[in-house]
Amino acid sequence: MMISKEISASPDSAQWQSIDWKSVESHVLKLQMRIAKATREGKQGKVKALQWILTHSRSAKLLAVKRVSKNKGSKTPGIDGIIWNTDARRMKAVNQLSRKAYIAKPLKRIYIPKKNGKLRPLGIPCM
């Protein structure tokens, strides 16, 4: 008996696939433009308020997870060993993102060879 992908897909996976990325990107871009404009005008209170809105915005969290999980180095886990390689994991990561009690983990340090035979250090952050 075969189960189709639509039935076995989790709600998080379907939710990730139904995101309108153009509107998410435009919302984040508009907020960033407003922050830049307020900075140019020297309105520090406005800048701080807009930064708070951006860091708490669902659009910004979605875009951050997408950028981290869809780039060239996304298949390499950091010290925590976590990778966001499925739509359900990406959506779970978006839902878990918050600024409260955030503590950055150290980078995973590996060395990659250069053309001259020497090794170059590379720091891999956690997701």
Image: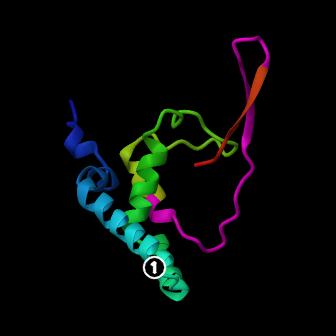
Of 105 and 24, nearer the camera is: 24
- By secondary structure, the bulk of the magenta-drawn segment is best described as loop
| 51 falls in the magenta region | no
Of 41 and 88, nearer the camera is: 41
Q: Residue at position x 54%, y 69% from top?
A: 98
Above or below, comparing residue 103 to residue 71 in the picture: below
**Residue 36 % position (x, y):** 45, 70
Scheme by which the image is coloured = rainbow
- The magenta segment: 94-118
Q: Does 77 sit left or right of 32 as displayed?
A: right
**Residue 121 % position (x, y):** 75, 31
Above or below, comparing residue 25 to residue 85 in the picture: below
* The quadrant where residue 102 appears: bottom right
Q: Residue at position x 27%, y 54% from top?
A: 21
- Quadrant housing the N terminus: top left
- Three-letter amino acid code at the position of disc 1: Ala
Q: Does 109 sit left or right of 23 as displayed?
A: right
Q: Residue at position x 26%, y 49% from top?
A: 17
Q: Residue furthest front?
A: 41
Q: Residue at position x 46%, y 38% from top?
A: 71
The residue that label 1 is drawn on is 38
Q: Residue furthest bottom?
A: 45
What element does badge 1 sit on?
helix
Structural crowding at the residue carrying mark 1, measured as other residues with C-alpha within 10 Å and reported as few (<14), some (14–19) or many (≥20): some
* The quadrant where residue 53 appears: bottom left
Above or below, comparing residue 93 to residue 79 in the picture: below
Count of marks overlaid on the render: 1
Of 98 and 124, nearer the camera is: 124
